[in-house]
Each structure stands twice: as C-alpha cells, then as structure tokens.
Amino acid sequence: MFNYFLRRLLYAVPVVFGVMLLTFVLFFMVQSPRMMAKRNLGPKATPQAVENWLHNRGYDKPLFFNTSPGKSWYDSLFFNHMRSLIMFDLGDSDSTGERVSTKFKKGAVPSLLITVPAFVLGLYLSLVTSLFLAFVRKSKLDVGGVIACVVLMSVPIMVYVIVGQWLIAVQLSWLPAFGFTPSGLTTAKFLMLPVLVYVCAGLGGDVRLFRAIFLEEVHQDYVRTAQAKGASHGRVLFVHVLKNGMIALITLVVASLPFLIMGSLVIENFFGIPGLGSLTLDATRTSDFAVMRASVYLGSLLYLFGLLLTDLCYASVDPRIRFK
Amino acid sequence: MTSYFPLFLCALLFLSGCGNNPHPPPLHETRPDGTPWRVSYRGFPDDPRTLDPQVSYDTTGHAIISSIYESPLQYHPFKTDPYELMPCLLDEMPQRIKENGGRETYLFKLKKGLTFHDDPCFVASGGVGREVTAEDMAYVFKRIGDPKVECPILSTLQDYVVGLKEAYEEARKTGTFDYSKPMPGIEVIDRYSFRLRMIKPYPQILYWFAMPFTAPVPREAVEYYDGKIHKRVQREQFKFHPVGTGAFRLAEWRRKGLIRLARFDRYNATTFPTGGWPAADDVRFRPMAGKPIPFLDEIQLPIIRESIPAWLLFRQGYTDRSGVGKDIFNTVISMSQELTPEYRARGIELYKDPEPSTYFLIFNMEDPVVGKNRKLRQAISSAFDEELANSIFHNDTYLNAQQLLPPGVFGHQPKFQNPFKQHDLALARKLMIEAGYPEGRDARSGKQLELALDATVDDPESRQHAEFYRSQFETLGIKLKIVENTWSRQQEKFDTGHFQIIGYGWQADYPDPENFFFLFYSRNAAPQGNNYARYANPEFDGVFEQMRTMDDTPERLNLIYKLNDIITEDCPWVLEVHPVLFSLNQVWAPRVSSNPLLAGGSKYTNVDVELRNRKLLEWNRPILWPLWLALGAVVVAVGFGIRWNRRHDV
C-alpha cells in the first residue's frame, strides 16, 4: 500500500510542475503586468503611477534572465515565481497588500462552516431518502420521488438561492436573507439558510445516484440469502444493502472532500459568507496577480489531493487496484 | 425512517431562537441620556482596497474614508448647481496670493482644537488623539511625493506644487523618502498656518483639498501600523487601520462581512450648515441649523456584493438606503418615473441625481478616414438616436448629452442644443454627401464605407449595445465592424491609438470645466494623458490655456462657450449621456445632502429609531404554519412507505 501511495505521489510531481509553468505563462506572458497595474490603479492612472506600481511589486524585472549589472541572473519574474510557489511563499495581494496566506486562512473557516455541515447533512439526507425510495421501490411514491429528483437536479443553484431567500427570509421571516456573525451560536442562525440551499441544490442528483446504487445491490445474491434466512426488509436494506452500497459511494464522496475548503462562489456571495468561494473570482475582477496565482496553484494541489485520496480509498477497499 | 425527526426538531429549536434580522447587535442599546442609540444600516458594495486617504482613488474607498478622515475643504452639502466648496478643517477659505513672476501661493489656516481619533499609536499621550497642526499637512504632501505610498494624484500635483517632483525623483533614486527634509512647496508658518507654493497658477488645486488625498494623517499612526510583529503581536498596516479627524472612527472591519463606524465623541470640525438648502426643505432643516454633528452614533455597513440580497434587505427594512438597479427598476419605478404605489405606501423616498459625468464615443483623430473628415463625424453624430438608446438601456432615466460639461459644472449651458445631436437623418445624409460618402458609399470608388468600433463586449447588455451602434451606423449606409476586446486590450488600445472609434466616459475629479476640456487638450494626449481622441487644435489649445487658470468670471464663461463651440463644430465624438442616479431611502432615514461629490455626508444624516423598530416588527412577522405542514407531509410519506412495504413483497 505504501509503494502504491509513493507511486501515485510521484505521478503528481510533473503535474504540479506543469501547473507552475502554466500559471507563469498565463499570468506573466499572456496578460502583461502593465495591464494588471492599470486595472488596479484605474483607467485614469498615469504612466508614472504604473511604473511605480510595477517597481514596488517587483513586476518590472526581466521575464527570464536578469542581465542588469549588480543583479543575480536569476532575479527575474520566472525564477521568483517558481521559487515562491515551491516554497509556498504566496506573497502579498497586489490589490490590498495583505498576505495571501492570511487571506486563505481567514476565508477557510467560514467556507468550511457552510460546506462541512452541508456535506454531512446532504450525504445523510441523500442516503436516508435514497434508501427510503429503495424501500418503497416500484410504488407511486418511488416514481414521484424520482420525478422530484429530476426536477431538483434541473433547477440551477441561483434559483434555489433566490427562492430560498424570498421564501424563508422575506415571506416567512424565519431566517436572515444575508449576513454572517462569527460569534458562537449566533453564527448558526446565518448558516442555516445557505446550508439548506446548498443541500437542496445537490439532493436531487445524489438521491438518484444513491438510489440506483442501492437498487443494484438489492438484486445481489447476498440479499436473497439474508431474506431467505428471515431478515426483515428493513434490516436487509439498512444493514446489508447500505454497507455494501457504501463501497461504491465512498470513492464518489471522498474526491469532493478537499474542495470543501474552497467554499461555494454563489452561496457565499449571495448570503454574505466571507469564505474562499469568491476569492479567485474577486482576484480576477481586481486583477490581483498574486491571489489568482495562489488560488490556481492551491486549487490544482487540492484536485491532485482529491484524486490521490480517491485512489487510496479505492485501493484499500479493492486490493486488485494496488497490485495492478 | 424516524431519522427525519431529530432534524426537524433541531430546525424547530433553532427557529424558535431565530429571526430574520441580519445585523449584529449595535455597540450600545441606549445613549447615556437614555435615548435610543442611533444606528444607520447601509449595504456597501465591497471592501475598500485601502483606507489610506493618500492612496484610495475609488468611490468605494472614498465613501468610508470621507467619514473617518476630513480634508481642509469640503463640498457644501446642498449647493450643487453650481457646486461650492466650503472650509472643513480650515478656519476660512484659503487665500490666493499672486506673486511677482506669475507665481502663486495659497495661505491656509487650520481651525484650533481639532484632534485625531484616540488610538494606541499616540503612545506619548496614552492613546488620546493629539491636536492637528500645520506640520501634519506638510507630512501629507511628503507622503504624496513618496513613491512607496503610491499616491495616484502625484503626477498631477507634481506639475504645480514646488519641490514635489524633485522629492519623488530623489526618493526613487535612493530608495527611501527623506521625511526629515522640508518640502519647499509647503511652508509651515506657525502651529496652524501653512503656505502652499505653486509652480504655475492652478486654481483647481482647491478641489484637491476637498478630497481625501489631502486629509491629514498622524505620522505616529503611519509609523506604528507597519504590518510588522512587535512583541509577538502583528500590527495591522496603516491602510487598514485609519486614524483620522472625521466624525466617525473605524470600530470594526470584518473583510467581506461588515464595516462598523462609531461616532467620534470629540468631533468639532463642522456643524450642520446654517443655510443653502432648497426652500422647500426649510421646515425640515431649519431646526438643525448650526447644531453639532454627527447625529448618528453608529453606522453599520454590511458588505453586500450582489444586488438581489441588497434589495431584499432594503425591502425588509434592514437597510436604510438602496440604489435602483436594473433588476428591480420596473418593480419600484412606474412608467412616469415615480415610485410604484406599493413602495410609495411604505413611505420610501425616491431621489434622482445627475452625476457629474459624460459618456461619449470618440473618433481617433489620427485615423485617415474618420480623423480627417469632419463632415463624416458630424454626419455620424447627427444620425445617432440617443433617445432610443436611453429608453433601451437606461429606462429613459439618463440625460441626453448635448455638450461635454454635465449639469452643475460651471459653464454648462442648460439650453444649449448641439446642431449635430438632434437625430436629424436628413442633415446626416446631406453631411454624408459633403463628406464624400453619399448613401454610405465612397463617391469615387463606389465601395461601401466600413468603420470599426472597439468595445468591451463581455455580457448580454454590452452585446446589445454594440448591436445598437451597428444599427445607428447602418442608417447612413455605413457598415460597422465591432471589435470585441477584453478590458485590458481595450485599455491598451486607448494608449496605443489602434482604434477608429471607441467608447469612453469621464467622471469629474472636480466640478470644473478644466477637468473636462482637458480631455481634448493636445498636450494631454495619450498615452501620457487622457486625450484619447488625439484631438489637436491650436485654437482650442490657446483658449483652453487661457481658461484653465481663471476664476469663475463672465470672461471665463465666454471662453468656455468658445471651447464648446469649437469642439461642437469639430465633432471628435458622438456625445451620449449624462447618467442620473436613482436612489431610495426609508421613511425613517430621509436623505439630507444631495451632493454626489460630498462623500462624507453621513455626518449630516439621522434616523428615527422608534419608527424603524415599529416598521420592522410590522414587516417581518414570522409565519410558522408551513413548517408544521412540511413536517406532517414527511410523517405521512414515511407512514405510507412502511405500510406499502409491508403489503408488497418487493
């Protein structure tokens, strides 16, 4: 298992290097730092202000090799970019001057406050509902449930957000339509509606998928054996089928775990959650080189980590994989 | 199946303790005298990038900074046509002194007894804010010249203030700005007076003294809040920890969450104006005349970046003001441009304010086709149906621009009718013939005229706008090619001049005609300046140079009219609109100042807390029966499932 882990880890190295190169090409060659400066300083910025901005951030250095007298040949945009990413020195935000790492740290907690409960609750509700639909399979309730799932899947997340805010916050006055206060239990009041919306948006697809997995399991031999031994329908479903179905589910679920930290753009923006969901978009909007570069880099690392986790989980439950 | 019950139980428990109020509790419930603590709630579109007054150059930043910092001058809250400056930190308006050799100086006298907000940076006084002195103003100008500060108006001021350019260049060379060295442009006369020495006359300099760039900052704060670790504690950077002299101090700033301002108890720079308001508002404002300000104790500014939640909060009564975005325009505003009955019944007030800005298309005057053919430019301008554009894109709310100067700026002519902005197709066709393009075809070759318009097309509306432009050119038989650019590419084209026609807009830095006409001054040509049309007319330049340094006299007015006539005839543009801003205020928080240039108007506003509390209760009563209905539906479904499963062997 350790060898398998090591092999998978080594596969990731060239991918990470490729991402570093790609971010350099995208952020320093396709888009010029001069334009970034203009975007940050506004259209009224004078050439002098642009020069000054570039100089203060070190973006006026040569692209690959520094041939200026008294400077190291590697004091260039390329080598500085590669060094900072390898050392995880994400630098300062070009737009506000804050440490990028601080921005990530501050945003991670509110994002997780939304995504973790939504993930757990969503998984729980999806499992319970899909098992229930499998329990009443072939009934009108099952058919109705599947239709409802298709409808839920077809609705864009924006609609859930708008309807959720309008119904729950404005019409019924149960919960705030917007806001976030990081102070103990009061925080829960602000998390409930976004979590509910997050769960509803994913419920239809998950229930359909889980139901299909459970129905496949229902026709396996071990189910017939259990029934022949006199186990009740409920016990067969909630003990035997659930356990075996989880093997297929676990690989699907684990891949999404690392992304919980990145939050959700729509949910966070519309509910005022100060998380990481909109970080990349904000950085693009404000032409914040440093933050964009860091989010692309960290995003790709998380993606690789998710794939690695999935592979490891799958390998641990199915030994054939790690011996291939 | 019983697993649903704990969930609903939790939901019920939470709901019992919840409400839909989105705001954190105020700093206090009541004032020391027992009256309600006055809090104003206003949605704010985004976090400011910086709260350093010498750096911030956007409306978001200025909106906050102007409440925390104050400048030597400010705009009068009521006088907008024309706009008027008044002293803020100063005792009186600065004296303009003309010296021999054409040089000028300004004499400024600060009010006595003005203090900075209390802050730990004032170590010597145990955190109590010290008095503002003329030395602080000298320090401000040094900061403006410091390359590390990145003051955006440095390049403008260094042409006028003695010694600023030299100080900047020396600091660029040595890598550090020498703050111990006096700057010859600012001479400190005594504790409260200072003199500003000018290289050449520039009366508009006073407008910069009404902006945050010239707001005094304490040197102690800049040096204390350096973002570094001191005794294991990391201090914030100065740009995130403002220490000003304004009516409010920054009490809290949660990024992407909330900005909370609290009243500065020792504020004494200004009082409520004693006049100048419209006659119709006399009953309302007369009792406040000369009263100490601010009236509010606290301002909460939740950061709301999306228009839908911002509107929902206003509709619920949880914010005191709102803009009228496109999403909600038809819900709130009737065909007659007034409030719909539903919102009128709620007591909401609607305001319509022309912004001091002008939008237009510009022709590249160096282009061999459009730049060299005045008749062609006049024809295109005459053919544009701006009223149609206004109705399609702006709900008929914007003003059809007939001249460069927007309303409120000295020299604006309310009755001026631009001969090439009357949507006169007959005139346009006649001009096309004179231009050598009858029916849009080259008179010599018979080839259809093809022009290119560069635009940032990145959403359905901008695409629609591009299509509109195409249709307008088609009325003259001209084929218009839309060159779609990203924002960056568009900026590059402005600088390099690689365009034929391009869209542009200018929002006044200050309400002076110089700040508009300089867009066509040949020495201000791009990329160094903002004359992106590359318009060069010696006659225009001569009149402009004469006009720019004059006081607002009838002679100056004549020169402005002359400039307007020259440029109207030369037509380096297709004038479009002067935007009008629609905004709403709740019944308990009516607006005071109508001046769009006065960013720090919060100090004049007030709220009726009791009325707001009553309305909030009325508008936000929780309805619980749907929860019981949903719970019942789940119970029925589970019961049905169990029964069905027992009956059918599946």
Image: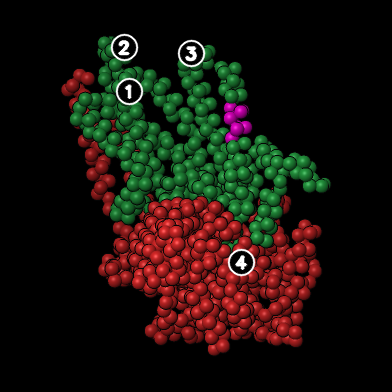
Which mark is nearer the camera, 4 or 2?
4
What residue did someone put label 2 on? A221
Are callouts 4 and 2 both on one chain?
Answer: no
In the drawing, what numbered circle is on residue A320? 3
* Picture coordinates of residue B128, whole percent (x, y): 66, 68
Q: Is residue A297 magenta?
A: no
Q: Earlier in the sequence, mark 2 or mark 1?
A: 1
- Which tint was used for chain B? red
What residue did someone put label 4 on? B525
Q: Earlier in the sequence, mark 3 or mark 1?
A: 1
Q: Amino acid at mark 2?
A: Asp
What residue did someone put label 1 on? A214
Q: Quadrant of residue B3?
A: top left
Q: Do the residues bearing badges 3 and 2 touch, measured as CB atoms within 8 Å?
A: no
Q: Relative to residue A109, is residue A69 drawn left or right? A: right
Marks 3/2: CA–CA distance: 22 Å
Which mark is nearer the camera, 4 or 1?
4
Q: Amino acid at mark 4?
A: Ala
* Picture coordinates of residue B176, whole percent (x, y): 77, 59
Q: Amino acid at mark 1?
A: Phe
* Picture coordinates of residue B242, whole percent (x, y): 62, 63
